Image (tube, rainbow, N blue to C red):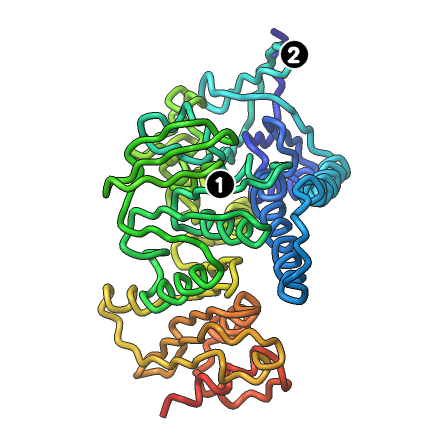
């Protein structure tokens, strides 16, 4: 093994927050290295946000065509779908590769583990090893899909979202284990591509963190799409092999048979192989790295970024971690505690949320007034012929400030961002109610929504 290579800033993992900070530091003339297992640009552009949203859009296009020509009988060309997703991903990877090169950082492809404080031993694909040292070290290794401890499930070789995004043949019947964000997005996309789909969820409703009216509306939408949703049951035994036929026995003794199984029951932090104890970095009982309000770990001059630090599992949340860390380097105070992170679920109807929902407000004993408007009342919805969904806002009865907003419907994420700007600006709900919003935009519904409050 060669002599250790020394850097001012050393990053283990190249996710959104880490790569953004690494490039900034490199452009500023610092000596920076990023150690990455192989996903140039991080999971978002390789196996998460970008490919999944590409797949979802392709599925929407197929669905739209089927509504226009119900008698077409055309079968989805899954190989072409996969090629489309790959083209988008490859383009994003190349953009990131160029950005890395232009910034001047050193990109190291290999698997790293700690051998001491701020010391990382990296093994490359050819088996060679190289030691790296950093004055400052950032851990940005992310998470991976959790495979439930169900007898027979590992032998079945279930899909995760990673493998599902690379399928070249359309599953005849896809069984999705999990009723969270990833499971729901994949379930609806494959249904619209032409698969029969069954969703198995161990909770009494979908999206347990959302309000009950949100869960109910999404369930109705899925059932309208022909997706079979099974609630309050969990898998207890699995048989078969993906692609050849699968059989899942559930806790109520019923059986679900399909051709493929996709697991979307949670995420596990990628920390077990890092030997973090040798670096003085502590993890919690679930394996997430312990950090303070500035993302500092228990080890000196060592920080964690993104999902591995327990940050909400969104790329935009990881990017805000970058802002927190950059502020610390520049001597400015910024914390992860006071931030409000928006949520977006890319199903149809789309879900957008910012701030508190009713469930959270009740649990925290926060007083609120609620405004709710069926989406069918918004003129733009009529032109789009997509009337399913609603808008809902929580308002402080004392200050008239908007403390939360939820929308289910076309363009929900964009409308939620408009409300978020009002919240950031400290505007009362009346300012949004009385704003002149162009007609007929979806956001014009905000005028109507807040007008329901007297």
Residue placed at 72% from the left, 39% from the top?
90
SS assignment at label 2: loop
The image position of residue 114, as x and y in percent, is 47, 20
Distance from disc 2 to disc 1, alpha carbons, whole Å, reads: 28 Å
Instruction: Farthest residue to the top: give it.
Output: 1
Classed neighbour count for the residue bearing mark 2: other residues with Cα under 10 Å, few (<14), some (14–19), many (≥20)? few
Of the 4 image quadrants, the one containing the C terminus is: bottom left
Which residue is disc 1 drawn over?
Answer: 305
Residue placed at 42% from the left, 27% from the top?
240
Which residue is disc 2 drawn over?
Answer: 126
The image position of residue 356, as x and y in percent, is 36, 66
Of the 4 image quadrants, the one containing the N terminus is: top right
Q: Is residue 61 visible?
A: yes
Q: Give the label on residue 28, or none.
A: none
Which of the two residues, 369 or 146, is positioned nearer the viewer here?
146
The image position of residue 163, as x and y in percent, is 55, 34
Which of the two residues, 136 or 109, is positioned nearer the viewer here?
109
Residue placed at 58% from the left, 47% from the top?
52
Which of the two residues, 413 or 214, is positioned nearer the viewer here?
214
SS assignment at label 1: loop
Count of marks placed on residues:
2
Residue placed at 53% from the left, 21% from the top?
112
Classed neighbour count for the residue bearing mark 1: other residues with Cα under 10 Å, few (<14), some (14–19), many (≥20)? many
In this view, the mark in front (2 or 1) = 2
Q: In this view, does 90 lie above or below 229?
A: above
Tell me which label, 2 or 1, sits earlier in the chain.
Answer: 2
The image position of residue 387, as x and y in percent, is 51, 76
Q: Can residue 432 be seen in this view?
A: no
Question: Left or right: where does residue 257 sit relative to residue 251?
Answer: right
């Amino acid at each position: 093994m060669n002599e250790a290579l020394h850097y001012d800033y050393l990053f283990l993992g190249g996710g959104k927050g880490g790569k953004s900070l690494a490039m900034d530091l490199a452009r500023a003339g610092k000596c920076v290295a990023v150690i990455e297992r192989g996903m140039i640009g991080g999971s978002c552009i390789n196996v998460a946000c970008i490919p999944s949203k590409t797949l979802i859009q392709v599925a929407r296009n197929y669905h739209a065509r089927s509504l226009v020509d119900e008698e077409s009988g055309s079968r989805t060309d899954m190989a072409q779908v996969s090629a489309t997703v790959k083209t988008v991903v490859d383009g994003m990877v190349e953009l990131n590769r160029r950005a890395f090169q232009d910034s001047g950082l050193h990109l190291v492809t290999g698997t790293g583990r700690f051998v001491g404080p701020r010391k990382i031993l990296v093994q490359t694909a050819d088996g060679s090893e190289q030691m790296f040292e950093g004055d400052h070290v950032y851990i940005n290794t992310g998470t991976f899909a959790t495979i439930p401890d169900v007898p027979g499930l590992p032998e079945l070789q279930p899909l995760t979202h990673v493998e599902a995004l690379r399928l070249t043949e359309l599953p005849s019947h896809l069984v999705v284990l999990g009723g969270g964000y990833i499971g729901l997005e994949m379930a609806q996309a494959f249904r619209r591509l032409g698969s029969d789909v069954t969703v198995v969820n161990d909770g009494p409703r979908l999206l347990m963190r959302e309000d009950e009216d949100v869960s109910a509306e999404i369930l109705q939408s899925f059932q309208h799409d022909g997706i079979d949703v099974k609630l309050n049951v969990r898998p207890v035994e699995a048989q078969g092999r993906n692609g050849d036929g699968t059989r899942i026995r559930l806790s109520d003794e019923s059986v679900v048979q399909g051709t493929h199984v996709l697991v979307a029951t949670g995420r596990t932090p990628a920390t077990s192989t890092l030997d973090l104890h040798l670096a003085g970095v502590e993890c919690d009982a679930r394996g997430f790295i312990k950090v303070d309000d500035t993302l500092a770990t228990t080890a000196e001059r060592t920080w964690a970024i993104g999902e591995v630090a327990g940050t909400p599992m969104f790329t935009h949340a990881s990017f805000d971690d970058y802002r927190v860390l950059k502020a610390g380097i520049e001597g400015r105070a910024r914390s992860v505690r006071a931030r409000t992170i928006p949520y977006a679920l890319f199903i149809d109807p789309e879900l957008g949320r910012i701030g508190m929902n009713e469930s959270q407000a009740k649990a925290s004993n926060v007083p609120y007034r609620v405004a709710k408007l069926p989406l069918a009342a918004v003129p733009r919805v009529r032109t789009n012929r997509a009337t399913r969904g609603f808008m809902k806002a929580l308002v402080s009865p004392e200050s008239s400030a908007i403390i939360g907003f939820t929308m289910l419907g076309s363009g929900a994420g964009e409308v939620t961002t408009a409300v978020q700007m009002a919240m950031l600006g400290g505007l009362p709900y009346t300012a949004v109610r009385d704003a002149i919003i162009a007609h007929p935009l979806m956001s014009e519904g905000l005028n109507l929504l807040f007008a329901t409050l007297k």
